[in-house]
Image (tube, rainbow, N blue to C red):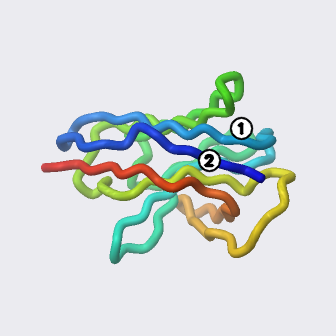
Amino acid sequence: QVQLLESGGGSVQSGGSLTLSCTISGHIDSSTSIGWFRQTPGKEREGVAVIYLNSPYYSPSVAGRFTISHEDSNKNTLNLEMRRLKPDDTAMYYCATDGGPATRPSPAQHVWVGHFPFEFYYWGQGTQVTVSS
C-alpha cells in the first residue's frame, strides 16, 4: 500500500512563493512516476510536474516558475517549489504516484503534463494553494 501526505499549502499574494512537500510511503525508484497535479472546481484536472526516470516534466503553464525535486534520503519526500505565483495557480494540489511495483488499484487518474501522459494510482488528500491578486 502506498500512502502520500502533502503539506505546505497556504495563501500568498501574486508574485510570492510557496513550497509544497509530500511524504511518500512505499518503494520509489527511478522507474516510478511521482508528481503533482492540481484541480479547481469547474476546471479540468491539470498535471503540474512529474519526475520519471530521473527527468522532470513540467506543464507549460508552470515551466520556469516551479521546480520539482525528490529527496529519497529524507523519508521519500517530493517537493514542489513554486515561485512567481499567479492567481491562476490557485487550486488544490495533489501529490501522486503510479506506485512503482505496488498493486495498482483502479481507476487511475490520467494526467497530461504538457505533451506527456501519466497515470497515477495513488494520491494524497491535497493541499490548498490560494494566490490573491
At x 76%, y 68%, the residue is: 105
Label 1, label 2: how far apart the Cα atoms are: 20 Å
- Which residue appears at 53% of the width and 49% of the height? 49
Q: How many marks?
A: 2
- Mark 2 or mark 1, which is nearer the start of the sequence? 2
Callout 2, which amino acid?
Leu
Horizontal and vertical percent position of residue 4: 62, 47
- Position of 30 compared to 101: left or right? left
Q: In the depicted view, which residue is nearer to us: 92 or 29?
A: 92
Above or below: residue 21 compared with residue 124: above
Residue 46 lies left or right of residue 74; in this view the side is: left
Residue 94 is left or right of residue 11, and the answer is right
Q: Which residue is mark 2?
A: 4
Q: Where is residue 32? Give x, y as percent.
A: 76, 48
Q: Residue at x 67, y 58 (%)?
A: 122
Q: Nearer the viewer, residue 29 or 65?
A: 29
CB of mark 1 within 8 Å of CB of mark 2?
no
Q: Residues within 10 Å of mark 1 (few under 14, many from 20)?
A: some
Q: Would residue 102 appear left or right of 72 to someone viewing this image? A: right
> For the residue carrying disc 2, how many other residues have a C-alpha within 10 Å: few (<14), some (14-19), or many (20+)?
many
Instruction: Return the residue nearer the eye: 103 or 119.
Output: 103
Q: Secondary structure at mark 2?
A: strand
Closer mark to the observer between disc 1 and disc 2: 2
Disc 1 secondary structure class: loop
Up the image or down, 75 lies above or below 7; here it is above
Residue 26: x and y in percent read 77, 43
- Residue depicted at x 77% and y 41%: 28
Q: Residue furthest top?
A: 73
41 up-or-down from 120: above or below? below
Where does label 1 land, which residue? Answer: 54
